Image (spheres, coloured by chain):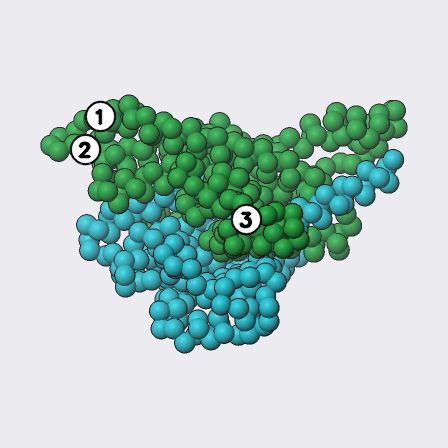
Chain colours: A green, B cyan
């Protein structure tokens, strides 16, 4: 940053909008434009195609389709409840890690990072093994006599929540931990010194000041949930179909313009949420500049 | 009272951590089971599912495909991402934020949208089932992570160091290679590890563009999980967990090294 200011001054008052260092980014831009933006945009454009010429018929078909709205409603419900559960579980854990001494905290953080790095497919498979009719949980409950017969755990909404929270919890814990770690804990001492109890000082000082971390984690989990495919497909039942699964069925059925119209709607929803919270989500140095 | 609050917070945290870790531990234990079915606890230990995995051509060729694609993705992501991050952080051009948003967008855009976009395009060019299709698709997802880690490392290096080398007569490339690069090397390696892991774990793109010829390990696992249940999947899962665990530890060590190599005081916000 210092250099760019310096070098532009050195080149005098000529209004130079580019410098040679900027050229280094061209191969990357070309690659992204050619192999990512073009395919995605041409896919999205198919939503406006119908037989011959352009039309909005695919959008009309999608938006007047009861099944689409039902699946959208399920998707939003699952995403919202997953986000709330992640916050409820993630906050105490992040708080605890932030308050522990560094050597222990580093080990606990590794335990949070381990599932974060493990593939979603492997983690979902683990829950299939645990929740199945002859799975670990049912077997154990029957063996110790708490259940007479195995109960239906897999392919239920509960299974979707459990597995999705498991997959997404690290996305809440990590930003919350970062916020709480840099938090000035003397403020809590000050509140206590002024006579606030532990609960009051948490509710009036710690919680409000950790809101940026809460919001960042919540937006991340919510937007990621909307696009979930693997987990609901494997542990959910037929009534837990999410929008990504519906899009996939349309693609397999060669209703490519319908699938594209649904993709446009989902993408618009995700981008609107991100735009609203852009300031909070922009946590990395590239977006901060 | 305070003691009790601290104790219950610790207990709750331990339970949440157990919830995070236990499923993977149980899968690893089950992969060593001597039973024909996935029973817990296993009646005895054996390596039969690993034998099954390594003696099956379908599984080993899927593993080879995954490693091959991931290596190619890593090299391509670094080749594009390192100069990209330098241009973004040190270059001067209009619309920087827009370009950054464009490069980082694959992280936010739902995977299914990227996957079907690539599927339609590759179908037009008859690239379905070609490993190159996987390499290109995975690179789109992996490159943002390289850009982020390299940019992060660069933000800790004082640009005046390179400027000093230039003033002492070094060419731009020599100044970069001998001054800046050694300081950002851990960030570069961490980006490479991220890129490898991204490709190695990726399923959605593979689901659409693998066809029947470019089957990766996650894709083979998916097919097996959906159409027949065999405990070899537990062995395959355990291998994936061990590989990603190794990658994670490397990345974490590199991250700590990057922190130590910072030459510039950061104004922390």
Horizontal relation, residue A135 to residue A266: left or right: right
How far apart, in angstroms, are the residues tagged by discs 2 and 1? 8 Å
- Answer with mark 2 or mark 1, whichever residue precedes in sequence: 2
Residue furthest front in the image:
A148
Secondary structure found at label 3: loop
Q: Chain of mark 1?
A: A
Q: Chain of mark 2?
A: A
> Which disc number belongs to residue A56?
1
> Which disc number belongs to residue A49?
2
Front residue of this view, candidates A4 and B211: B211
Horizontal relation, residue A47 to residue B265: left or right: left
Which quarter shows the C terminus of chain B? top right
- When the figure is inspected, residue B247 is found, relative to residue B18, above or below; the finding is below
Secondary structure found at label 1: loop
- Picture coordinates of residue A225, whole percent (x, y): 47, 38
> Which disc number belongs to residue A150?
3
The residue depicted at 38 percent of the width and 73 percent of the height is B56
- Picture coordinates of residue A98, whole percent (x, y): 72, 44
Front residue of this view, candidates B166 and B11: B11
- Answer with mark 1 or mark 3, whichever residue precedes in sequence: 1
The residue depicted at 22 percent of the width and 25 percent of the height is A56
Mark 2 and mark 1, same subunit? yes
Q: Callout 3 environment at 10 Å: few (<14), some (14 to 19), or many (20+)?
A: some
């Amino acid at each position: 940053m210092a250099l760019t200011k310096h070098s532009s001054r050195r080149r005098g008052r000529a209004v130079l909008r580019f410098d040679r260092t900027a050229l280094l980014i061209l191969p990357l831009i070309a690659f992204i434009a050619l192999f990512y933006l073009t395919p995605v945009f041409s896919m999205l454009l198919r939503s406006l195609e119908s037989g011959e010429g352009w039309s909005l018929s695919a959008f009309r078909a999608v938006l007047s389709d009861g099944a689409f709205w039902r699946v959208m409603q399920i998707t939003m419900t699952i995403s919202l409840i997953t986000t709330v559960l992640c916050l409820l579980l993630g906050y105490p854990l992040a708080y605890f890690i932030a308050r522990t001494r560094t050597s222990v905290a580093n080990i606990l953080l590794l335990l949070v990072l381990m599932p974060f790095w493990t593939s979603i497919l492997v983690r979902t498979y683990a829950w299939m093994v645990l929740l199945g009719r002859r799975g670990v949980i049912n077997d154990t409950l029957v063996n110790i006599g708490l259940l007479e017969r195995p109960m239906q755990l897999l392919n239920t909404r509960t299974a979707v929540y459990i597995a999705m929270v498991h997959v997404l919890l690290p996305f809440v814990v990590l930003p919350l931990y970062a916020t709480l770690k840099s938090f000035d804990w003397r403020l809590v001492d000050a509140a206590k010194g002024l006579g606030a109890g532990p609960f009051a000082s948490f509710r009036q000082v710690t919680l409000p000041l950790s809101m940026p971390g809460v919001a960042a984690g919540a937006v991340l989990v919510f937007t990621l949930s909307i696009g979930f495919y693997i987990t609901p497909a494997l542990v959910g039942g037929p009534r837990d179909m999410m929008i990504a699964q519906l899009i996939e069925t349309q693609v397999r059925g060669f209703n490519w313009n319908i699938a594209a119209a649904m993709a446009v709607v989902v993408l618009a929803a995700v981008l609107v949420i991100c735009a609203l919270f852009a300031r909070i989500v922009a946590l990395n140095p590239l977006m901060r500049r | 009272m305070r003691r009790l609050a601290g104790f219950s917070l610790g207990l709750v945290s331990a339970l949440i951590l157990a919830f995070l870790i236990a499923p993977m531990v149980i899968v690893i234990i089950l992969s060593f089971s001597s039973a024909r079915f996935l029973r817990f606890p296993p009646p005895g230990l054996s390596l039969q599912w690993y034998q099954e995995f390594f003696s099956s051509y379908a599984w080993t060729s899927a593993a080879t495909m995954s490693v091959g694609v991931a290596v190619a993705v890593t090299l391509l992501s670094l080749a594009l991402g390192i100069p990209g991050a330098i241009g973004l952080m040190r270059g001067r051009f209009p619309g920087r934020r827009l370009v950054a948003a464009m490069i980082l967008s694959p992280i936010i855009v739902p995977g299914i949208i990227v996957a079907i976009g690539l599927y339609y395009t590759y179908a037009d060019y008859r690239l379905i089932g070609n490993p190159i299709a996987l390499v290109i698709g995975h690179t789109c997802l992996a490159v943002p992570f390289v850009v982020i880690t390299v940019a992060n490392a660069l933000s800790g290096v004082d640009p005046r160091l390179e400027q000093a080398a230039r003033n002492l007569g070094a060419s731009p490339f020599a100044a970069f290679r001998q001054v800046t690069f050694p300081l950002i090397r851990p960030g570069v390696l961490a980006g490479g590890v991220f890129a490898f892991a991204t490709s190695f774990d990726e399923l959605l793109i593979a689901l659409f563009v693998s066809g029947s010829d470019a089957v990766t390990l996650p894709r083979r696992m998916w097919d097996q999980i959906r159409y027949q249940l065999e405990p070899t999947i537990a062995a395959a899962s355990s291998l994936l967990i061990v590989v990603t665990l190794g990658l994670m530890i490397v990345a974490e060590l590199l991250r700590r090294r990057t922190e130590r190599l910072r030459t510039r005081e950061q104004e922390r916000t």
